[in-house]
Image: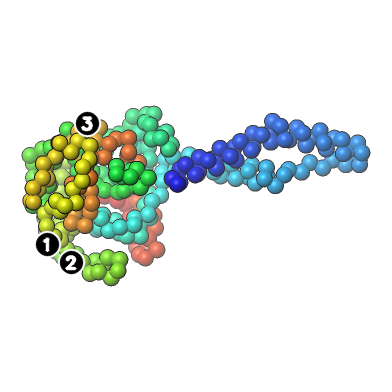
Amino acid sequence: MDFSLIMLVLLLITGGVSLLDKFLLYPQRLVESARLAREQSKITIKEPWWVEYAKSFFPVILVVFLLRSFLIEPFKIPSGSMIPTLQVGDFIVVNKFIYGIRLPIVGKKLLEMNSPERGDVMVFHYPENPSIDYIKRVVGVPGDNIVYRNKQVVVNGVLQKLEGNGDYNYVEPGLNFVHTKIYNESLSSGRSYKVLQNPVAPNMRLSDVVEFPYRENCAYNANEVRCIVPEGHYFMLGDNRDNSRDSRYWGFVPDEMLVGKAFMVWMNFNDFKRVGLSIN
């Protein structure tokens, strides 16, 4: 079950019990205590345990719910699709309001703010299964003509700069050693970040391409994919380009599935040096 939904249910239960106690149960206890006072010359007002617990937890749950729904939310990185920017085991913080204030659970936007920009590292609900959250980098915004050709990105006819920066090796779960090349990728907008490419991996895995909304906006061959990003949608790529299942394979991310922008690593129990790193 979605954690936000669990928090909402707990909030409604504890809040409901608190209101029930304030307007019904507490007045009844006062009446009963007054009767006992007349009979026993003392007043005892004792809350039922379930009322006491509900009233104690309600403000805590309310604060957590509001923080996670409208301000910031923590996530854990479970896979290597965003290496080297994000490592497996990173706990990150996501800005929930930068792309607009949304109703919890349903995701309906209440207030327009900023729009995602090329280069943003963004968390979103996976279009094929919205109960799962994904994190990738925004490469295409609405109206863009995106080409991923021979492992290079072309945006609106402009080849994005890619500079080699040596070797990068890492170990996948299961102790699988992976050798890649690391590059500095610079967007024409001025954003720059690091990406990985596996020199022995194919340009495209055509067998992994599935049907998706606006599939007619894309054309594929063994060396490239080219897509025109529909209005209200975004084209996403993982920084670990040959180990990422992203918009090349399952299509575009609609605006209503955006969660927020990742901006900081707050913990990694395997590498404390990553604590506090900003996410570029």
Q: Provide residue 181's location: percent of width, then percent of height.
A: 15, 62
What is the crowding at mark 1: few (fewer than 14 residues within 10 Å), some, or many (at least 20)?
few
Rendered residue at 72%/44% (across/down): 48
Asked if residue 108 can be seen in this view, the reply is yes
CA–CA distance in space, label 2 to label 1: 8 Å
Work out whether residue 18 or residue 212 is closer to the camera in this orientation and state it. Answer: 212
Q: Circle 1 — which element?
A: loop
Q: Residue 107 placed where, x, y %?
A: 38, 35
The first of marks 3 and 1 along the sequence is 1
Specify whether 103 is left or right of 174: right
The residue that label 3 is drawn on is 231
Q: How dense is the environment of label 2, judged by Cα within 10 Å: few (below 14), some, or many (20 and up)? A: some
Q: Answer with the quarter of the image where residue 275 lies.
A: bottom left
Q: Amino acid at mark 3?
A: Glu
First in sequence: mark 2 or mark 1?
2
Q: For mark 2, give the secondary structure.
A: strand
* Residue 59 position by quadrant: top right
